[in-house]
Image (cartoon, grey):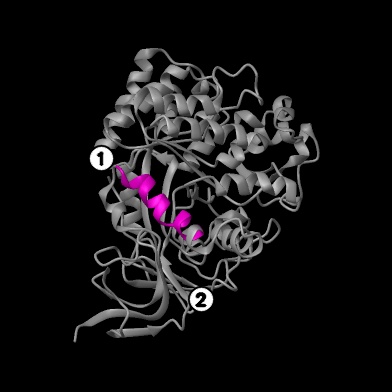
Amino acid sequence: MTAYDLVLANGRAIDPETGLDAVRDIGITGGVIRAVSPTPLTGTTRVDLGGLVVCPGFIDLHSHTMDVAGHRLQALDGVTTVLELEAGAYPVGAAYHKAAQQGRPLNYGFATSWGIARMAVLLGLEAGGDIEEFLAHIGHEDWQRPAARPVVDRILAMLEGDLADGALGIGVLVGYAPRVDPSEYLAVAALAARHNLPTYTHARELVEQDPTTPIDGAEEVVRAAAETGAHMHYCHVNSTSIRHVDRVLGLVEKVRAEGSRVTTEAYPYGAGMTGVGAAFLAPEILHRRGLTAHSIGLLGAEGRLADEEALRAARRDTPGAAAFVHLLDEDDPAAFDYIQRALAFPDAAVATDAVPLLWRSGAPDPLAWPLAPDAVTHPRTAGTYGRTLRRLVRENAVLGLQEAIRRCTLVPADVVGSGVPAMLRKGRVQVGCDADLTVFDPETVTDRATYTDTAQGSSGFVHVVVAGDFVVRDSEIVTTAFPGRPVRA
């Protein structure tokens, strides 16, 4: 009789690809699923799940929290793989090297960053950085301006070098430079198409929000898919579309029917978060989104901004400061329905847009756990998947349990997997696949983070396994576990 390194026994195994939903023992050796058995298996370690759901670990396509503390907070929400794809990093080699040197609890990966490469060229910055580097220069108008073709070619060459170095695609924050010529966006999409990798876009303004926009943000994404053949991934379609989500999703549905590949993602919150210096938070244009200065609150500060003067001061003095942007009232069923429609759209992935943790008292010990009580973030960092399972499955029945799991696992694995073979071993509970697994109680799983207590991990996720090792066991972080592996193209 074969003995496995680890056996997860008597779990309700749900595999979203094959449709398996039955009690199984799962045998794991060497970080790989070696058996999915209806009969008992033996193992060096055998954990009886008592009928709890065991499914693929959740794959977050859109996480900006790439340090150990952020990984642990996401692990308590069932996540096993975090990918920085919308903002990306440049150069990706440095980002992968840093993560490998420090060790990570969860699997990790990066797209290359159009925004950071563009800043390097147009602002004369040293080429290198991540989301924090981007936010530090977010309000600088020179990087947002249209560029001549030779400048665009320099940016494209930088991105192409990163794609050759294993980047998972191209992150395109065009919404932060909304006056860039649409031809540059098409050139970036064409580059991604040549490498058979997706672009991950924060779309620019919709025409309803800015009638003077060079191109409607949704039209731009679907046009690029049709004209270049690129796989275009539409990031957080809920927060960029707001009340226009039906028109945007209708466009996506139309081009899909015509043969283009456009994928979407959403998160179950009504507030976004970005650097307060973002172009679309200029006080004089907030009304386009139905917002006022009081719709915005700085992370780590008490309450929301009082008025336009306070907003202008924040944009001038600390443009990279993280800011809540309250777009829709989550407690209003009619408003929350816009969010649910984005999440229920066919094959939409659940993704967090998780943001880096901020400690109000200064720099913490990066390995300290539990988190210090002054740690703050957006609640979606800590609770996106618990909230999806609570609100969309258990309370509102918008998605069935199996379908919700598919949106958190197989769908994101396949978004990335078209050009990244390693992702085809994730998002599945099958022999030969990576032993990245999440165990939870579907009757009690829930988010705990709120806008006033932002860094509370979800509850109901009992075990989380990465590459065959527990990173969460009996609902507690395993502080010695750093099994995360890089995902590269």
Q: Nearer the viewer, residue 337 or 357?
A: 337
Residue at the spot 57% in from the left edge and 33% down from the top edge: 248
Percent position of residue 355, x then y: 54, 50
**Residue 290 found in image quarter:** top right
Q: Is residue 376 above or below residue 110?
A: below
Local packing at callout 2 (Cα closer than 10 Å; few below 14, some 14-19, many 20+) is: some
Read off the residue under disc 2: 475
Residue at the spot 50% in from the left edge and 40% down from the top edge: 235
Give the structural element (helix, strand or loop) at label 2: loop
Q: Can residue 289 be seen?
A: yes
Q: What amino acid is labelled 1 in the image?
A: Asp
Residue 319 within the magenta-colored segment of the rendering: no
Label 2, label 1: how far apart the Cα atoms are: 37 Å
**Residue 152 found in image quarter:** top left
Q: Nearer the viewer, residue 222 or 126?
A: 222
Q: Nearer the viewer, residue 53 or 98?
A: 53
Read off the residue under disc 1: 165
Q: Which residues are magenta?
A: 404-418
**Residue 178 found in image quarter:** top right
The quarter in which the N terminus is drawn is bottom left
Local packing at callout 1 (Cα closer than 10 Å; few below 14, some 14-19, many 20+) is: some
Residue at the spot 29% in from the left edge and 42% down from the top edge: 419
Percent position of residue 450, x then y: 67, 59
The quarter in which the C terminus is drawn is top left
Q: Nearer the viewer, residue 304 or 207?
A: 207
Give the structural element (helix, strand or loop) at label 1: loop
Compared across the picture, whether 199 is left or right of 100 comes to: right
Percent position of residue 92, x then y: 33, 42
Percent position of residue 210, x then y: 65, 22
Name the residue furthest left: 1
Q: Can residue 155 be seen?
A: no
